[in-house]
């Protein structure tokens, strides 16, 4: 391609980007739904937007490869990849504008995402222009394009999945490092206008309950505010406070006090999930039966902020709180030095079960099972309360070792397969109150021992393939018993 042709194409790219910038200024998304065709075409935006993301990263990778002698031939492809990235970014921007303008979107988050897309397309066109004429400024522009792409993609992710989608499950240590606050509990109301403190209950209504704040607002916060909140106001409707709910959207009020069936919001949440007007939209799961009944009761009761205590008794009951499982063991971190010392001295592994430091340790011996015997188990007593899973298959543990294991109070899973354990060694295991799974495959435990241990309270799984049959008894080998406990 000649320099003149390249310059003309870059000029065309800048012109297209400028047109979309003007459209964003003069005809921004305003929360009004328009033509079906525009919405249909615009909904290809989430599909198309992945192409420029991939190409930008590929172009940066090819340029980095040029710093290595063996990778220099690959750098020649970077210009073509960059041009395709710019063209696909402009195409994705056009689809995004159609979707936002015609799909009833509005809000600061929508605007930031769209401005990010237009800016990214313009910077990519600039990269194509600078690549041949100024290597230094080209490197800066390409780095800016990568950073802008990441930021714009993050805004798009928040649009689709909510503001806390990326950081919702971030480990606490990373939150502290990057200064990210912990997310509110699921269903919690975060808007000050929706808190119970904002609801003043008159003296003559002290027997009333702030029903909207306590029961309705958490449902909207959990299922609706992603699309109908301060950052994204689809259809000009916000559901993040009582006043906004009652104000309605572009088509008027969505709640008619006392008339659930005549209320647009109730109609939409009860539509079949495949209906185009069903809420929540965009493939998100619908409300539960209980949540729908709560909203129906609230509207039928007058759609007020407070409801008489006597009337609240008629509302669907609150779901039972989810039981909080106690920690499997103590926090192992204060004893890390001791754990590491034992691993080195004994030749075993003490591996965390998960990222939760109170989820316990797994005792692993598979790398050298012959090194693990009864004396090794005795040496592990300082950390016995931390071990919840003991993998002792093919080790030299005997019946004497089970007496030591009976002092591991949090042991839940125990694998003694292919060991010298006999039925006499099972008696101490009755003291393990938390034991749920026991593997006795290929041991010297006989049928009578199997029958006794199978009656142990709390034991859910008992494996005894190739067990030793009792004299005159049928062989139980090859079976798997699931305890009824």
Image: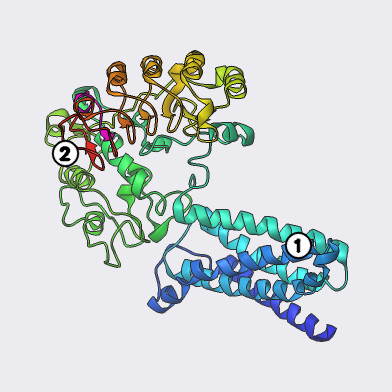
- What residue appears at the point 53 percent right and 71 percent down from the top-left corner? 48
- Choose between 420 and 348: the one closer to the eye: 420
- Choose between 275 and 214: the one closer to the eye: 275
Q: Check disc 2 and report the residue beneath it.
A: 316
Magenta region:
452-464
| Residue 79 versus residue 410 in the image, above or below | below
Q: Residues within 10 Å of mark 2 (few under 14, many from 20)?
A: some
- Choose between 430 and 22: the one closer to the eye: 430
- What residue appears at the point 55 percent right and 59 percent down from the top-left corner? 111
Q: Position of residue 210 (x, y in %)?
A: 26, 32
Q: Residues within 10 Å of mark 1 (few under 14, many from 20)?
A: many
Q: Is residue 110 left or right of residue 117?
A: left
Disc 1 from disc 2: Cα separation: 57 Å
| Residue 140 versus residue 460 in the image, above or below | below
Q: Position of residue 407 (x, y in %)?
A: 38, 14
Q: Check disc 1 and report the residue beneath it.
A: 142
Q: Is residue 469 left or right of residue 118?
A: left
């Amino acid at each position: 391609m000649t320099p003149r042709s390249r310059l003309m194409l870059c000029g065309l790219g800048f012109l297209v980007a400028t047109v979309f910038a003007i459209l964003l200024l003069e005809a921004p998304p305003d929360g009004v739904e328009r033509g079906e065709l525009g919405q249909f075409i615009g909904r290809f935006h989430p599909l198309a937007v992945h192409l420029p993301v991939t190409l930008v990263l590929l172009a940066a990778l090819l340029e980095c490869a040029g710093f290595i002698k063996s990778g220099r031939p690959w750098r020649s492809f970077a210009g073509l990849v960059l041009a395709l990235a710019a063209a696909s970014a402009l195409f994705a921007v056009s689809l995004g504008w159609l979707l936002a303008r015609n799909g009833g979107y509005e809000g600061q988050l929508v605007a930031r995402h769209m401005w990010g897309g237009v800016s990214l397309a313009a910077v990519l066109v600039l990269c194509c222009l600078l690549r041949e004429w100024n290597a230094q400024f080209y490197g800066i522009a390409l780095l800016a394009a990568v950073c802008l792409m990441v930021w714009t993609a993050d805004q798009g992710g928040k649009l689709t999945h909510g503001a806390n989608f990326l950081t919702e499950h971030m480990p606490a240590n990373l939150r502290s490092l990057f200064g990210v606050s912990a997310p509110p509990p699921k269903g919690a109301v975060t808007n000050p206008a929706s808190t119970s403190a904002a609801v003043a209950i008159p003296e003559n209504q002290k027997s009333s309950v702030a029903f909207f704040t306590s029961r309705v607002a958490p449902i909207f916060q959990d299922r609706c505010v992603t699309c109908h909140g301060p950052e994204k106001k689809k259809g000009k409707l916000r559901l993040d406070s009582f006043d906004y709910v009652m104000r309605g959207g572009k088509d008027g009020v969505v709640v008619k006090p006392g008339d659930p069936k005549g209320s647009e919001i109730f109609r939409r949440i009860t539509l079949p999930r495949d209906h185009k007007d069903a809420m929540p939209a965009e493939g998100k799961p619908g409300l539960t039966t209980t949540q729908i009944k709560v909203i129906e009761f609230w509207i039928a009761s007058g759609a007020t902020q407070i409801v008489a205590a006597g009337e609240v008794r008629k509302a669907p009951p609150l779901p039972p709180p989810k039981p909080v499982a106690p920690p499997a063991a103590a926090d192992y971190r204060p004893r890390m030095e001791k754990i590491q010392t034992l691993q080195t001295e004994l030749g075993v592994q003490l591996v965390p079960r998960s990222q939760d430091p109170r989820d316990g340790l797994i005792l692993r011996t598979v790398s050298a099972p012959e090194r693990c015997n009864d004396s090794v188990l005795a040496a592990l007593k300082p950390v016995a309360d931390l071990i919840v899973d003991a993998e002792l298959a093919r080790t030299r543990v005997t019946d004497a070792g089970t007496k030591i294991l009976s002092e591991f109070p949090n042991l839940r899973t125990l694998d003694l397969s292919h060991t010298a354990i006999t039925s006499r060694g099972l008696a101490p295991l009755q003291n393990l109150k938390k034991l749920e799974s026991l593997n006795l495959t290929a041991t010297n435990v006989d049928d009578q021992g199997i029958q006794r241990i199978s009656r142990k309270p709390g034991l859910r799984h008992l494996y005894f393939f190739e067990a030793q049959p009792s004299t005159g008894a049928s062989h139980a080998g090859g079976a798997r018993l699931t305890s009824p406990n």
